[in-house]
Image (cartoon, rainbow, N blue to C red):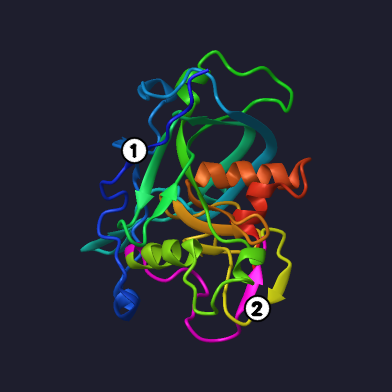
Amino acid sequence: MKPRTLVLSFAALFAGAAFAQERDDFVKFVAPEGFGGHAWGETRASFDRLPSQPVGVGAAWMRIQEKQAAYSCQLNNWLPKYIEQWIPQCKPQETMRHPNFEFKAGGSYVVSEYAIDGQGFRYGDEANGVVLHPVIYQFCANWQGRRRGKPPANFAELNRFCGMKFMFQSETIDELSKLPVDHVTAYDHVLERLIAKYGRPLGFSRRGKVFIDTVDSESKDDPSHRFRTWRWCPAPEANGLRTYCAASVTLTLDPVSGEGSILYSTPILWEFAFARENYGFQGDPLYRVLHARD
């Protein structure tokens, strides 16, 4: 059997990422618009390099969720206020029956993940770069159907690019106990480059208590390192349904295994995680990473 080879791209994966601690306060978050020349919302069929079979598939169902923004005035006859001016009059009952919704979510969800065999990237330079591998492409389909209904005939059209997952390996807690206190981990390098690219994540401060936060939200004090899940443009509430950005960015690490990830997650992927957690799959890992607050 032929050994698999990891092919690294040394081109800048995220343009402009560099160490810039003294200027990260001036960096404004700009959501990623996609990856590899593909924009969010493109159909799965437009990705010709991906294998035919996914590496993973998940499904969820959720009751219809609507967020109301305002009401649309349903006009009555225009009535004169003065001879020179006319003002519109709203029909109260009709207006109440025509709300505008900021978004409408729910129904059935299917998320599939694909990976190109051997694809990987170096995030950073030769000296301090971190290898991102595997690289996982995520596609989401959503339709207003029954919980156990069959996918619709137009599933291929609904199945669209909705997220990216970049995995990397950092030092474990056990390994760090044998290294110098000032050792800079792979996680540290990734965090600094993300801050240089996207600014400071929610709740970030370079001062304060140092602690370790696992994916399961079990924190432990540590004298030298801070491993925490950081989020750029998460949902606005602790149990929020979705991000309001084109995509959020999340950095997470399991300190025991040293396995880390960078997640690009569009609103529909947030909805999927919310549906998994609240409609039958409590403790869903994606929900814990995206939604959980420290």
Left or right placement of residue 220 versus residue 201 in this view: right
Q: Which residue is mark 1?
A: 39
Asked where in the image residue 227 lies, by quadrant, the reply is bottom right
Q: Residues within 10 Å of mark 1 (few under 14, many from 20)?
A: some
- Tell which residue pokes out farthest to the top in this image: 153
Q: Does the magenta segment cover residue 268?
A: no
Determine whether 77 is above or below 52 in the image.
below
Residue type pointed to by label 1: Ala
* Earlier residue among tags 1 and 2: 1
Q: Which residue is mark 2?
A: 222
Determine whether 73 is above or below 52 in the image.
below
Asked where in the image residue 27 lies, by quadrant, the reply is bottom left
Q: Residue visible at 47% across and 71% down?
A: 184
Can residue 25 be seen?
yes
3D distance between C-alphas at marks 1 and 2: 40 Å
Whole-percent x and y of residue 256?
A: 68, 59
